Amino acid sequence: MKSRRAAGRPGRRLVLRLAPGTDLMDGLRDLCAEAGLKAGAVTVVIGGVRHASVEVAKPDPTSPMGVSAKEVHLEGPLAILGAQGMLCQTDDGRLEPHLHVTFVDSNGHVLGGHLVAGTAPVSSTADIVVEEVLGVRFGRRRDPELGAVLFLPEEKAFPEEKAFPEEKAFPEETA
């Protein structure tokens, strides 16, 4: 596997709030897809979930990477201390979030890992900030050498990409 890079430019900053009962990953994906986002970096996630499942790494000498994923279910309620990740596109064009999240349970234990989609219903709210990246495709596909689905950045212009027009200062900010 070779290292890769791609250079993009900043687009919009999406600020999202998910309602109680919404799955964290599904809600993130749906609101970003609705906004027409093609690639983004998830920079802020705070709030709470009722429960969640995460994947953590476990040693695996049979894997080309030396590790494999182990799914762990976390009972809630869980507060989200933070998360970071990306919104990627699959080869068929679907938007797919990839989040690594840190939770704290009601006993003060901090737990985290790769969030499994469909396992984290929001309890109160989940507040999220996503930074759009234009001119880059954040791909996710199976790497045949490593046998895992991994991030694959590619420079690519999407004809439908539109950044917001230049922001205007609020009246109290003008001199």
Image (tube, helix red, strand yellow):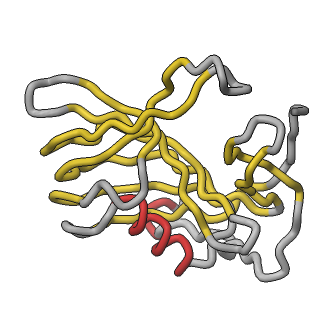
Position in image of residue 43 (x %, y %): 51, 45
**Residue at 32% from the left image edge and 55% from the top image edge:** 119
Left-right relation of 120 to 59 = left
Left-right relation of 168 to 15 = right
Front residue of 162/111: it is 111
Quadrant where the C terminus is found in the figure: bottom right
- The relative height of residue 126 versus residue 110 in the rendered view (above or below) is below
**Residue at 67% from the left image edge and 27% from the top image edge:** 63
Residue lying farthest front?
62
- The relative height of residue 21 versus residue 8 in the rendered view (above or below) is below
- The relative height of residue 83 versus residue 137 in the rendered view (above or below) is above
**Residue at 63% from the left image edge and 17% from the top image edge:** 61
Position in image of residue 133 (x %, y %): 71, 58
Residue lying farthest left?
107
**Residue at 16% from the left image edge and 33% from the top image edge:** 105
Front residue of 59/91: it is 59
Position in image of residue 159 (x %, y %): 84, 80
Front residue of 116/8: it is 116
Position in image of residue 44 (x %, y %): 43, 46
